[in-house]
Image: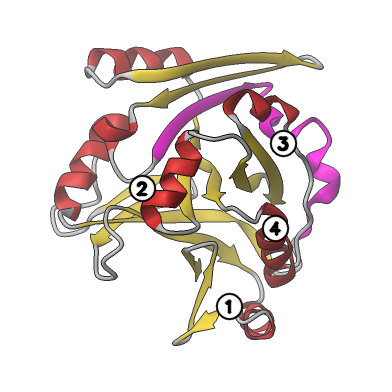
Amino acid sequence: MRLRQLVFVSRERDELGRKICKLLDLKESYNDAGLINFGLENVLIPLGDTFFEIVTPIKENTTAERFLDKKGGDGGYMVIVDVENFEGEQERVETSNIEIVWHGNRKEENIQARTIHLHPKQVGGAILSIDHMNPKTAWLWAGTDWEKDINKTLVDVVSGVVLQSDNPELLCSKWEKALGKKRVAENNLSILLNESKISFVQDEDGKGEGINAFAVKTLDRNKILENAEKINALQNGNIYLGGVKIILD
């Protein structure tokens, strides 16, 4: 199990995408026309074989639009993990009494993509999606030729997500159940995945439960900080884009 895609929601998809690409020297790769069925437009940006996604509501009364209204602006929206044994994970979720709110099964160009979205109120903090690709090197949500757009000048892959809550211990417990993984230790509210981790912290900014930060494995920290200053994304030494702190691992 590995973090594979981290999702922003924004009213200004193009502007946020431009800033992310300028900050991390990346390229936009794909727009999924199928998201119109959810009242959304998107863009996928590869970081190695992992991805940032930005979704923008284009119809009224979508979940994404309600999120933006509730939070008063952009923010982290969804966490997508890639698993080896999809059937086993789905069965585990079903027997844990966590409701699955959406099943996806898409086939295209000899790639099969499967996904389940867990009930966000039962998990908390973000929409959690458990996904699987066959072949496992594919990632159909980003199309079929995203590898041509990879650039590893400044960053390698996404490496973590931080969730905040008034009760981070309880939120961590919910994610342990949802993922079938235990935290590192009682005094360490982090769940380790392959090459990545999910951490839980106290809400100290008053924005309530949700995504606090996305982490990326960094190859040139100084250049990223220089880029952040140029696009006015630095606040007290930290990088913020799309309502999310960007942590440089």
Which numbered disc, 4 or 3, marks the residue that appears first in the sequence?
4
Left or right: where 150 falls relative to 203: right
Which numbered disc, 4 or 1, marks the residue that appears first in the sequence?
4
Query: Label 4, label 3: how many angstroms apart (C-alpha)?
Result: 15 Å
Residue at the limit of the structure toward the front, as seen here: 60
Compared to 149, does 130 lie above or below?
Answer: above
Residue 175: which quarter of the image?
Answer: top left
Q: Amino acid at mark 3?
A: Ala
Tell me if residue 245 can be seen: yes
Tell me if residue 196 can be seen: no
Query: Label 4, label 1: how many angstroms apart (C-alpha)?
Result: 13 Å
Q: Amino acid at mark 1?
A: Ala
| Residue drawn at (60%, 44%) of the image | 55
Tag 2 and tag 4, C-beta contact below 8 Å: no
Which numbered disc, 3 or 2, marks the residue that appears first in the sequence?
3
Q: Tell us which disc is closer to us: 3 or 2.
A: 3
Could you say which disc has been placed on residue 192 in the image? Answer: 2
Q: Secondary structure at mark 3?
A: helix
Q: Which residue is mark 3?
A: 142
Q: Which residue is mark 4?
A: 17
Left or right: where 83 falls relative to 27: left
Q: Amino acid at mark 2?
A: Leu
Q: Is residue 123 magenta?
A: no
Q: Secondary structure at mark 2?
A: strand
Q: Amino acid at mark 4?
A: Gly
| Residue drawn at (72%, 36%) of the image | 142
Range drawn in magenta: 127-151
Q: Which residue is mark 1?
A: 233
Pick the quarter of the image with the N terminus.
top left
Q: Tell us which disc is closer to us: 2 or 1.
A: 1
Compared to 92, does 244 lie above or below?
Answer: below
Which numbered disc, 3 or 1, marks the residue that appears first in the sequence?
3
